[in-house]
Image: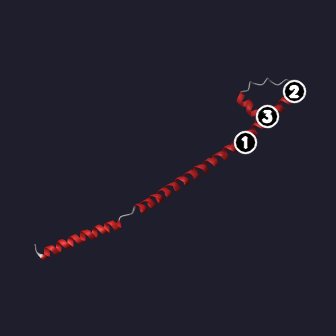
Amino acid sequence: MSAEMWAQVGLTGAAAVASAFAGRAARRSKRQENRDDFVAISEQQGRAIERLEKRVQQGETKAELQQEKLAECDEAIAWLLVRTRDLVGSIRKSGGEPPAPRPMSARAARVLERSDV
């Protein structure tokens, strides 16, 4: 083997060793990977929390609308009760007898019990 060939083998070996060290230096450490995983998971959780907050806000809005509808229904029931009592009173005052009431369901009776009229 000639000297040139030995020089070429030596340079090739040195290049291989240098590329191995460069590859090792460029490789990400386990700690860096864990940190990146933590950041990714934190971002995912942040997005999930935002979605949940949005759903909670929508639920609160729906609950407020339902409460408002219930209050309107309560007011309508109270008005109907007062109107019915007034009509029965005027029928009795004129000397007549109002028709007998229809049977009431247990659910309707509970609603009337809760009514403040």
Residue at disc 2, secondary structure: helix
Spatial separation of the CA atoms under disc 1 and disc 2:
30 Å
The residue where tag 3 is placed is: 81
Spatial separation of the CA atoms under disc 3 and disc 1:
14 Å
**Dot 3 alpha-carbon crowd within 10 angstroms: few under 14, some 14 to 19, many 20 or more:** some
Q: What residue type is labelled 1?
A: Glu
The picture places residue 63, in percent across and down from the top left corner, at 65, 45
In this view of the protein, which residue sits in the foreground, 74 or 29?
29
- On screen, 8 above or below 57? below
The residue where tag 2 is placed is: 92
Quadrant in the rendering for residue 22: bottom left
The picture places residue 16, in percent across and down from the top left corner, at 24, 68
The disc, 3 or 1, on the residue closer to the chain's N-terminal end is: 1
Q: Quarter of the image for the C terminus: give it.
A: top right
Nearest to viewer (mark 3 / mark 2)? 3
Nearest to viewer (mark 1 / mark 2)? 1
Q: What residue type is labelled 2?
A: Arg
In this view of the protein, which residue sits in the foreground, 54 or 71?
54
Q: What residue type is labelled 3?
A: Leu
Q: Which residue is pictured at 50% across the width and 57% down the height?
A: 42
